[in-house]
Image (cartoon, rainbow, N blue to C red):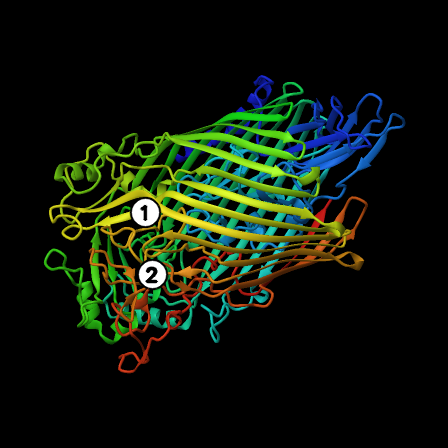
Amino acid sequence: MARQRLARIAVIPCVALLALCLAPPNASAQTVNGTLVGNVEDSTKARIAGARIKLVRPEIRFERTTKTNAQGEFRFEDLPPGVYEVTVSSDKFKPATQSVTVAVSSTPTLTIRLEVAGIAQTMEVNAQGLSYATQPIETTSSVQMGVVTAKDLALIPLASRSFANIAYLTPMTAPVEPSDPTKARITAVSFGGSSGLNVDLSVDGGDNNDDWIGGFLQNYSVDSIQEFAVRTAQFDADTSRTNGGSVVISTRRGTDQWHGGGAFYDRDQALNARNILDNPAPDPKQPFSRWNSVATLGGPLVKQKFWFFSSFEYVDENASVAYNSTSQTEFSALAHLASLGLVPGVNSIPVPTSTPVPFRDTIYTGRLDWSQSPHSQWFLRFGLDRNRTMNDLVQQATLPSTGATTHSNYYSTLVSNTWQLSDKWLGEFTFQASQFYHSKDRNSNLGEAFAFPFSSTAITTSGFETFGDNQFTTAITAFPIRRMQEKYQVRYDVVHVGGTHAVKFGVNFIHEPVLSGLLATNAETLFRFAHDPSFYAANPALFSNVINCNPNVSDCSAINCDPSNTVCDSKTENPATNGFFHQGIQRLGLYVQDSWRVRPNFTINYGLRWDTTFGLFNDMGLDQTHNPGVTTIQALGLPLAKGIPHDYRKAFAPRLGIAWAPGGSSNTVFRAGVGMYYNDLMQNGWVDALRAVTPSPGGLLGPGDQGAVIDPRYSTPYALQASAGFEHEFAKGWRLNIQYQHSQGVHQYRRYEYTSDVTLPDTAPNLSVFRTDNRSRYDGASIIVQHRFSNRFEMTAHYTLASATTWGATVGELFDYVNGVSNVNNPFGPGDHGPSGEDVRQRFVLEGTVRLPARFEISTLSQAESARPFTMTTPVDINGDGIPNDRAVVNGTQTYLDQFRGTPLIQVDLRVTREFHWTDRVSIRPFAEFFNLFNRTNPGNNFIPDISALPVNDPANATAICLNPACTQMKAITSLNQLRVPAGALGDFFGPGTTVGIPFAAQFGLRINF
């Protein structure tokens, strides 16, 4: 089946090329490009109506024409990023030619002044390539955004060579490593305190979203990207499927001039500092090496007609997971228990000092551009990303047996056409086919897993097993060992520019016949131990009690309980299950929007969007009536909502924004906007309810069985957003930008756990109920200062003060799957409201480049932020709802959601390079890059969250810290900071491929461009 689908995707480029030749010329293209707005006036600043405007880009045979309206204004929509020549002519005036740079998703405003007839005049502006700090002020757009150009990507130090490394240059964003281990090295960007999963990502107009867990899907080499826009507030109605932010990427293309280059990046163990959190001296420093090879080439196949561009990158990385002395001591104790014959089926366990984690990645992008005529432009883009990771999921305090070999394959093919029907009408067509296939094969299949406190103290992607089979489940969710996502997208947009209005409307349809996967299905015995292996090495009889417990004879849920009966060992036999799920989903979006120039200095952007999904709750073509949990609720008359969820059809999203340039100024603008933004929850949240659907349910669930249902009162989550901003450019290259953003999340995800004989009758099963009743809020204010001094220095600095809050049980995330409730009988109870997991109260970012004599350049990306929160939990059922893992109790008071804070992050990255010219067209740049230059330890919020893993006197009510193993010596807890203990190389800021938080690392390389 997988090979058939791969073959189907493989022929798509051929089919697309055929469609390119056969399709009618009025089937037109994409919407991620820029817009140019202009004014034509005479020497007295009076507007000139009816002036003839010709827009050309000679190197790609691109041409558009229009006339100014009665207000002397003109507008060109859907312009691919690049430099254009604008020629203006009018009777009795000299013709004028001016060049302007248009960036992706931008709306620059151009003012052209005509003189009395005579010799033609020519002006050139923006001759230098734009960078993040030199974007022109957009006086007609209400969108809060920033544009990262190819120039930025080439100069700024990138720790993992990911475009997301610098997406957080834009205010209201922050770095975050995604919690999805089924996508290797796909970094994320947190918008407005979110998890980074509620972001819309488009590449050349094609959808690049992961519909299983959210966030970005396919990765693209930095060298294949022309530029990208990071939009944080007030998007136009043509943007869908986000209640956080959006990232719009445009890939590089060929021109009539041959261009390209090559580069390598080298980093090894000698260039990396020791990670003292998990690899302290005197242990050997963990091995590491990384080599990136990059090659690009573009040029004409037929000049003025047909061009190509290709980008290739290969990553050869040999990372490793080092074990600290505590882990090695506990591993040795477990190995001793195995040598005594106490570990079933295992007589010996090797104890390495580290585990290698080799990673190989091939990323390729190819693009063909064809100018059918000056008014019709086509392109075909193909991309792939194929990677493999050995010992994937192995983390600090877990042995190699818990790892897996991971293969991920991404493919996408996109065809696009833009056709100017007339001076006023423009048609845009986009078709994309994409596929993602992922497999994760365990290192061991022993049928057993051992969980000890020292390795179950952090929420890790590998779950909580120290040794044995990886169950691939976490406190967040269960992750599949197989994934398939096949998607086809057709988008058609029409633009009409006339008078003072620029109206745009369109349809976006996504057909996703395959959204499937497989969770681990084999039978497995899980042993949970309340103490670490060293304790059982001294007390082997207690270890044997757990191993030899027979669930058919006795209760194995509580073994070797301590006198207070709050800490027990347990043995759970998990039977084989049906872990397969398969969906076919369709998504439809319709929109209309208008940019209305009410006055030359006042623009209103308004629009309406409607989105819906078909088959969101179906599995194997069956709806939730085939879920035995649903039939059990109805048959037993349980006090839960009866019925099944249906696709939501009321997602109407109005949007309104204004832009005002006082006095027609070109260097000052006020922006404001409000809007609604819908985004379906991804399927990973309620996969248990999906895979419960079977053609033959097989009766009702009984006491002790586990069911999962989706509340029938489902509503698509949305955000209510309001924003305001002021931007002004002073003399001498200084610019000030002040922004405010408010976002209120509605109908977000929450999980309710009902237990038999506690919160449900004793005749009922245990039930997980998934509801969309959560709420969240984000408020942020930013000050951005930018400065450019000639061509020697440019700088962007911004400071953000923000607050993000939500409801949750132990982890608070905006748009995520960890928002459970502490008590189903009081779902909005005290202590359940608090900061989101990515609540960064203060954040400062500095990016800049200094060009020194002798062609040396120094660039930096530095950031500092206040500590992020985390929640302290206990395995004890504090709330009495039958579910353990409640929030910890300290000195008789239960802590609240995300009450604890980690440590502030400070990281300075630096790049030093020197340019050498071999010929007029060939340049050579050797460089050195330094990450975390001052080697600051940055654990972030990665602190031990389980109070039972700390040496406290009572995990049910901690009042003192134990000073010796027997806890006969104690120190009273007088501050919650006494419970902060770093958890090692896990969490948001650590691990291979991490973009921030790493110890000092350096890499050297060489780049050749022509």
Residue at the image position 76 percent from the left and 23 percent from the top: 51
Q: Is residue 295 above or below residue 352?
A: above
Residue 540, horizontal then vertical, whole percent: 22, 72
| Between 564 and 730, the one nearer to me in the picture | 730
Residue nearest the observer in this picture, 130 or 73: 73
Q: Is residue 628 left or right of residue 267?
A: left
Percent across and percent down for residue 469 are 31, 55
Residue 674 left/right relative to 56: left
Judge by depth and name the residue closer to the eye, 9 or 853: 853
Label 1 crowd bin: few (<14), some (14–19), many (20+), radius 10 Å: many
Indicate left or right for 473 with 856 as reference.
Answer: left
Depth check: give the residue in front, 739 or 351.
739
Task: Please tell me how crowded label 2 is: few (under 14), some (14-19), or many (20+) other residues with Cα within 10 Å.
Answer: many
> In the rendered structure, which disc, 2 or 1, sits on the residue that comes first in sequence?
1
Residue 73 point in image, percent of width and height: 70, 28
Residue 14: image location, x then y, percent: 54, 26
Residue labelled with disc 2: 896
Residue at the image point whose x is 64% and y is 48% from the top: 153
Distance between the alpha carbons at the discs numbered 2 and 1 = 17 Å
Q: Residue at x 33, y 75 (%)?
A: 973
Instruction: Determine whether 787 is above or below 82 in the image.
Output: below
Badge 1 element: strand
- The answer to whether residue 219 shows anywhere in this view is no
From this viewpoint, is residue 36 visible? yes
Q: Residue at x 59, y 41 (%)?
A: 671
Residue type (three-letter) at the residue carrying disc 1: Arg
| In this rendering, the label closer to the viewer, 2 or 1 | 2
Residue identified by numbered label 1: 750
Q: Residue furthest right?
A: 118
Quadrant position of residue 372: top right
